[in-house]
Amino acid sequence: MEEMKSSKKPIRWNVFIPCFVVIGGAAILGIVNNEWLTTVTKAVFTWSLSNFGWLYQIVSIVTLVLVALLAFSKIGNIRFGGAKAKAKYSFGSWFAMTLTGGIATGLITYGVNEVLVYFGNIYGELDGYGIEALSEEASYFALGRCFYNWTFIPYAMYALSGVVIAYMYFNRNKELSVSASLTPLFGDRVTKGFWKAIIDILSVLAIALGLASSLGAGLALIGTGLASAYGIAQGPVVWFILTAIITATFTVASVTGIDKGIKWLAGLTSKIFYVLLIALIIIGPTVYILNMANVGLGYWLDRFWMWGFDPYTVGGEALVTWWTMYDWAIWIAYAPLMGIFFAIIAYGRTIRQFLIINWILPASFGFVWFAVWGGTALDWQIQGKADIIATIQEEGAVAGIWEFLQHIPLGFIIIPVIIVALIAAFSTTADTMSTTISALCTQGARHDEEPAVWQKIVWGVSIGLIACIMVAFGGGEQGVDGVKYLAACGGFVVLIIFILQVAAAIKVFFFDKETKKDIEEGTNER
């Protein structure tokens, strides 16, 4: 592969214009009547999960099993691009881009908060199982449930989309698009006309709105941190400045391309993550962390199948619908576009290597992160060193992280590092996705060509503006609720596309004669 060139190919206006209009319309609606937007989208989202939670759960388990079969069977020997294809990125750079490109601010935001929400039964998450808040079993449950929500199942969703898109593009010479991943089911007609446009439009909208909601929540979170640590009052000026910094960061990184901007930013973000993890292992209660990691893992595995198939009947809506199913909706909304980015940087790698980097390692990293951060937070709450639960009850589900950090040794150093990490983490995800959205809006996009610069700028600025508008006009974190629920509704729509991708993967990898030839070629190469 040569140095990436800037693409001058024509724009897919039938995808670009509808997406731009809907995103702009959501921003305008957020200004005019944010309360109505929130009410309607929440109602639609609640209805979708109340009626189709069972389907989300079945799809998630099937995806997990399918990805495992691909990774540990002879199918894993298939090399993207053929036996002679050479990888461009080192394993370190590749993992940094996939890890930081896929999690945004999630690990930092919820590594402490979600664990303590469960432990304190703040919104009734323990009621379905009759577990007493603040008990020993509540601590086991808190870590075990976070391991379930943040490790192997969600990353399997990303990996499944990525592996089928990469295989169809590199080995079957199909175009680089979501619709092309469905050709094993529908043939080439799905890559033409109305169906191609609608599939790609829905995929772009889901992730663009998802990024806007993530940025909005991130703005509110960083603003809360600035107020808590430095006494800087939240308000439109602060939110505008933060938006400008974050948007400029990820837009510039996207414009400079994968090899320069995105690769560099991903490397920086991953190093910050590694340093924070190591620092807390040293600072925190190390033995307690290790013990609770074991117990939490055992608790999760012991209840895996019940958790895996429960649509909310056993665990209750407070836990299953508003945490796990909401997460599944967002991960599925992101999966097709995230899959395209993962495919772009996977040339020359085998399916097994792809799944190690995009499924096993990030899931393992999530396990370690929640064990260390969540375990430390549990210990400090139990020992009375910090009252994180009270902070969450008073200020909201994501506020506990700042109470936690106020009590951490060397907090005056770590708190600004966390703020920088939040900005860098979101920027890494946003720049990969603005590049991918631009590619999907370009006719004949290729993995070794950069989309037009103006497109990257338009999408980057649009995502930043909608987030800033929703926060400023909605009055903080609650201002992005409308876009958050809209993004989750997008996940419900994309669920249909994702199910078709799962079916396409089963058909092409297990029943296609041409794939068997690729498997033999990959096996002989070994």
Image: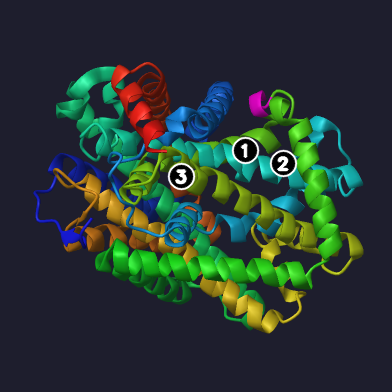
Secondary structure mostly seen in the magenta stretch: loop
> Taking 50 as reference, is 250 left or right?
left
Mark 2 to mark 1 CA distance (whole Å): 9 Å
Instruction: Tell me the residue that label 3 is attached to.
Output: 353
- Circle 3: element type: helix
Determine which of the numbered discs, if any, sits on residue 145 in the image: 2
- Sequence order check: which comes first, mark 2 or mark 1? 2
Name the front one of labels 2 and 3. 3
The answer to whether residue 326 is visible is no
Residue 57 or 130: which is nearer the viewer?
57
Which residue is located at x 64 percent, y 58 percent?
398
- Sequence order check: which comes first, mark 2 or mark 3? 2
- Circle 1: element type: helix
Where residue 57 appears, as percent x and y from the top left, is 58, 26
Where residue 365 appears, as percent x and y from the top left, is 61, 54
> Taking 136 as reference, is 143 left or right?
left
- The three-letter amino acid code for the residue at tag 1 is Thr
- The three-letter amino acid code for the residue at tag 3 is Gln
Residue extent of the magenta highlight? 308-312
- In the rendered image, which quarter is residue 110 located in? bottom right
In the rendered image, residue 86 lying in the magenta stretch gets the answer no
Mark 2 to mark 3 CA distance (whole Å): 28 Å
- In the rendered image, which quarter is residue 392 located in? bottom right
Where residue 59 appears, as percent x and y from the top left, is 52, 25
- Sequence order check: which comes first, mark 1 or mark 3? 1
Determine which of the numbered discs, if any, sits on residue 324 in the image: 1
- The three-letter amino acid code for the residue at tag 2 is Arg
> Taking 24 as reference, is 524 left or right?
right
